[in-house]
Image (cartoon, rainbow, N blue to C red):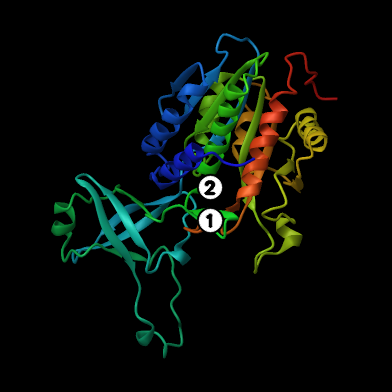
Amino acid sequence: MKFEKKSIQFLEEYLNTASPTGYEHNGQKVWMNYIKPYVDKIEVDHYGTAYGIINPDADFKVVIEAHADEISWYVNYITDDGLIYVIRNGGSDQTIAPSKVVHIHGEKGIVKGVFGWPAIHTRIASQNEPTPKIENIFIDCGATSKKEVEDLGVFVGCMITYPDEFFELNDRYFVCRALDNRIGGFMIAEVARLLKENKNELPFGLYITNSVQEEVGLYGADMIADTIKPNIAVVTDVTHDTTTPMIEKKKEGDQKCGDGPVVFFAPSVHHTIREMIINTAKEKGIPFQRAAASRATGTDTDAFAHSNGGVPSALISLPLRYMHTTVEMVAKEDVSNVIKLIYESLLKIVPTMKLKYH
């Protein structure tokens, strides 16, 4: 599958639009604008989860889902001399922070800053080399007092994101911050586009769902599952490429960028839906990988599966390198194959499927 120019333009705009957890609305506007021609109806819930519906009057409901939020920081404390200390919003990695440029989303607009760090000259003779911790990383926005910081519109509670933008690497990878998991929102949007352009008639209602607040506890999926009350949910998220240095495959499994979508085995993954997906991959010649999760998948799959008395759910993941950094990386070929696998799997679903556990 070769990506159309309009698809790449959408992906770039979507990834470059900051959408931190709890403040996903700007990214959701980009996403909804793209899917609008491909669905019959668009809805948004109270906390910002957006979903496009095909066949909204159908009784049998299928969800394909990704999450829209990205990790970020909160302003937590401003010193008298104008330095800013932070707390996490999601699983932000303090070890990558020093020397990074940031955007502080202040009350008067974006304020630039940098995560400062003591120069190597001042540390090299130290017996206790400092390491980045939440307690010692700080942002310098060029101010010399707390009042000056606040005059810029920056207060406790302001959101902080990285401005790193989308690019392609060696014509093989997409690279950007927030591929976890706005690449998922891109993939389900492309499924909606394919269904429309190929004039597929589905015998059920399809809810293309872009949930909020996954990074802090699957909260958006938990809420929207109760709203939609689906019969089936197919979730897509990212998982680790475990072939890069310093990752233990015995613990993290064996998944690799370029080897195809990852189909998960886990208690929350329903046998019938998973086997339908695997059989579809085999039938259509779509490469895929397998992975296992012992208790929870850690994705919105768990929220859907455990909602409404139990919703048959499955997880199709995209291998990704350097998760929760500003250089997250996915193989273009894998992105294409996840889209194909979700699309082809939807064409196999019928409302008369036997979904009872057996």
Compared across the picture, whether 270 is left or right of 80 comes to: right
Q: Is residue 227 visible?
A: no
Image point (18%, 57%), residue name: 149
Q: Secondary structure at mark 1?
A: strand
Please tell me in which quadrant of the rendered image residue 119 appears.
bottom left
Q: Is residue 331 visible?
A: yes
Residue position for label 2: 180
Image point (28%, 61%), residue name: 113
Residue 274: x and y, percent?
Answer: 76, 33
Residue 239: x and y, percent?
Answer: 64, 49
Q: Quadrant of the C terminus?
A: top right
Please tell me in which quadrant of the rendered image residue 264 appears.
top right
Amino acid type of the residue tagged 1 in the rendering: Glu
Instruction: Report the front residue among 142 and 339.
Output: 339
Q: Are marks 1 and 2 in contact (CB under 8 Å)?
A: yes
Residue position for label 1: 328
